[in-house]
């Protein structure tokens, strides 16, 4: 595979599916694409936060998409709610929860949301990860 080739994988999810299965899917995808170390950790953390946000504030995530492209890596979670995600204001670092989108905001180059046919997609663009060839 050429290093500049765009790659995409998605996982369809159903109500009640555990988010851990989606994180495992993301981990396998990153390994297949030769992404590991800090880059993989950041992608997995952001992906887990987007999934947790959808699980906590909507009827649950319905799809996880991972895109590797020349601008970086985009993780996107689609859920059935049209309500936009919001960073809690005021942000309290000592609170036991409410850190999800703050973490996403700190690790991502950019993040946002857009309407989807049934709900919305919340996405985060992370820096282009270093890749090493997969020895298969």
Image (tube, rainbow, N blue to C red):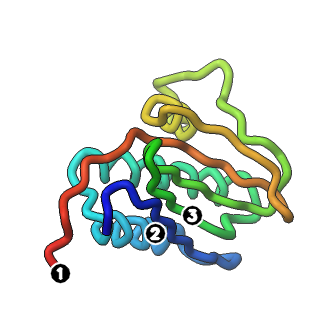
- The picture places residue 16, in percent across and down from the top left corner, at 65, 76
Q: CA distance from mark 1 to mark 2?
A: 26 Å
Is residue 121 rendered to the left or right of residue 126? right
Q: CA distance from mark 1 to mark 3?
A: 24 Å
Q: CA distance from mark 2 to mark 3?
A: 15 Å
- The picture places residue 37, in percent across and down from the top left corner, at 21, 51
Q: In the image as oriented, which residue stretches furthest toward the left?
A: 135
Residue carrying label 1: 136
Residue carrying label 3: 65
Above or below, 128 relative to 82: above
Above or below, 25 relative to 36: below
Say which quarter of the image contains residue 13: bottom right
Between marks 1 and 2 in the image, the one whose residue lies nearer the viewer:
1
Q: In the image as oriented, which residue stretches furthest toward the top?
A: 90
Instruction: Indicate the secondary structure of the residue bearing disc 1.
Output: loop
Q: Going 83% across and 46% down the picture, which residue do you hit?
A: 83
First-in-chain label (1 vs 3) = 3
Instruction: Indicate the secondary structure of the residue bearing disc 3.
Output: strand
Q: Going 19% across and 65% down the picture, which residue do you hit?
A: 133
- The picture places residue 98, in percent across and down from the top left corner, at 58, 36
């Amino acid at each position: 595979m050429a290093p500049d080739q765009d790659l995409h994988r998605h996982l369809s999810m159903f109500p009640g599916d555990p988010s851990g299965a989606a994180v495992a899917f993301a981990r396998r995808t990153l390994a297949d694409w030769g992404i590991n170390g800090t880059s993989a950790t950041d992608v997995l953390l952001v992906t887990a936060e987007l999934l947790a946000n959808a699980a906590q504030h909507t009827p649950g995530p319905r799809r996880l998409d991972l895109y590797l492209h020349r601008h970086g890596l985009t993780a996107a979670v689609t859920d059935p709610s049209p309500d936009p995600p919001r960073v809690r204001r005021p942000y309290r670092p000592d609170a036991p929860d409410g850190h999800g989108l703050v973490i996403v905001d700190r690790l991502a180059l950019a993040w946002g949301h857009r309407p989807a046919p049934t709900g919305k997609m919340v996405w985060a663009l992370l820096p282009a990860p270093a890749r090493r060839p997969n020895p298969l």
